[in-house]
Image (cartoon, rainbow, N blue to C red):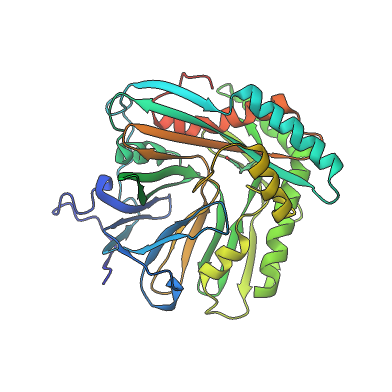
Amino acid sequence: MASFMTAPDERVPGRWDLSSSSFAFLAAAEDIVCHGLRPRDGTDPVARPVFIAGALPFDRTRAGHFFVPEEVRRGRGLVRREMAAGTAAPPVLSIEPRPSPADYGRAVARALAALEGAAGLRKVVLARSLRLLAAEPFDPAWILRRLARDGAATAFGVALPARAGQPRRLVGASPELLIEKRGTRVLSHPLAGSARRDRDPALDRAAAEGLARSDKDRREHELVVEAILDTLAPWCRDLAAPKVGDLISTDSMWHLGTRIEGTLKVPEAPLLDLVRALHPTPAVCGTPRAEAARLIADLEGFERDFFAGAVGYVDEAGDGRWMVSIRCAEIAGAAAVLYAGAGIVPGSDPVAEIAETAAKFRAMLDALDLDRKEV
Ligand SMILES: C=C(O[C@H]1C=CC=C(C(=O)O)[C@@H]1O)C(=O)O
């Protein structure tokens, strides 16, 4: 039976240690740290009143990874945010971009041609990856603490099923809320449309203002809001989104965002059904979804796996929160794969999309103490 505690218990060192956690969700409002897991048998996990954590892969035809932790701890400020640099990051021996930035630019150009040619295709999100090899194993707990310094994001760490005997973990800091459920209220806060932040305050403000004025970014964003409203409409009454979205900032990026809120018609509607209906939104896939997913499979040239999926939990009351799994990496020993994608619509520029994805890698690179690496 999962236990719930609202305060850190420092008297049991190791038990709430992040490095042995099966699931961690570190946010300004609340930290959740889980240990142990009881694998599920694939039946609908929301049917029983237990705490369920997990991750969905990008590919909606593939099974999600859900589990019931043995122990769940929740509390505000449960986990200390790590400020010190250089103490635990192993030296990184190599960084291999896959595809290369130039090939990614060519894929964006092909996506633009498809957007002009294919009837109905309006947006596709193309990603690229960085394969890192370090001299020693990465410490996911230390990375998580570093990621959690950004109060605008939820830092997450999920133990994934081992591959070839090697334990894997998805870690990241996502600013994008797929859906949250509290009682009968649901909230989604999609993001799409981006600009890199700047250390110079005047240039930073100019970047935000440029993003707010950008027609291309607005179109990219509106498709996501439209899709989420259409998906949630049958489930909700009082479904509302402001006509004008907001500008949100993480430590490294500006984004266009829109808060979408509604009240469930059926209060006990399972949160995981809503997650599955919404995922993947056009913030990570495209519009229409099936056509965009096909183009991604044709053009990207690597497996997204749990990148651009969703991570989150459903608690015993049926409430919970699922974040879009972006600004993340899969860590397996001394190897890490970092991911970043960008929405492509008519008017997108391949060179700008290379720069945008480079900027989106910053959250993970900075957490790994690679803040001076250009990618
Ligand atoms: C797909 C990613 O970001 C999404 C979220 C915010 C802004 C986005 C954009 O402007 O393209 C993307 O839709 C990513 O970070 O890998």
Residue 337: give x, y in percent of width and height.
Answer: 45, 35
Instruction: Identify which residue, 301 or 316, lies in the foreground.
Output: 301
| Depth check, front residue: 185 or 177 | 177
- The extreme left residue here reads 11
Would you place residue 231 above or below residue 34 in this image?
below
Q: Please indicate whether residue 235 sits to the left or right of residue 270 in the image.
A: right
Ligand 1 quadrant in view: top right
Q: Could one spot residue 213 in this view of the protein?
A: no
**140 sits to left or right of 251:** left
Can you see residue 275?
yes
In this rendering, the answer to whether 128 lies above or below 169 is above
Tell me the quarter of the image containing the C terminus: top right
The location of residue 157, given as percent across then percent down, is: 38, 47
User: For the point 55% across and 47% down, which residue is it?
Assistant: 308
Query: Residue 87, percent across and down?
Result: 27, 26
Residue name at image x 41 percent, y 32 percent: 367
- The residue at 28%/68% (across/down) is 2
Counting from the top left corner in percent of width and height, residue 117 is at: 86, 41
In the picture, the quarter occupied by the N terminus is: bottom left
Q: In the image, is 244 to the left or to the right of 373?
A: right
- Seen at 55% across and 77% down, the residue is 269
Query: Against 32, is 363 above or below?
Result: above
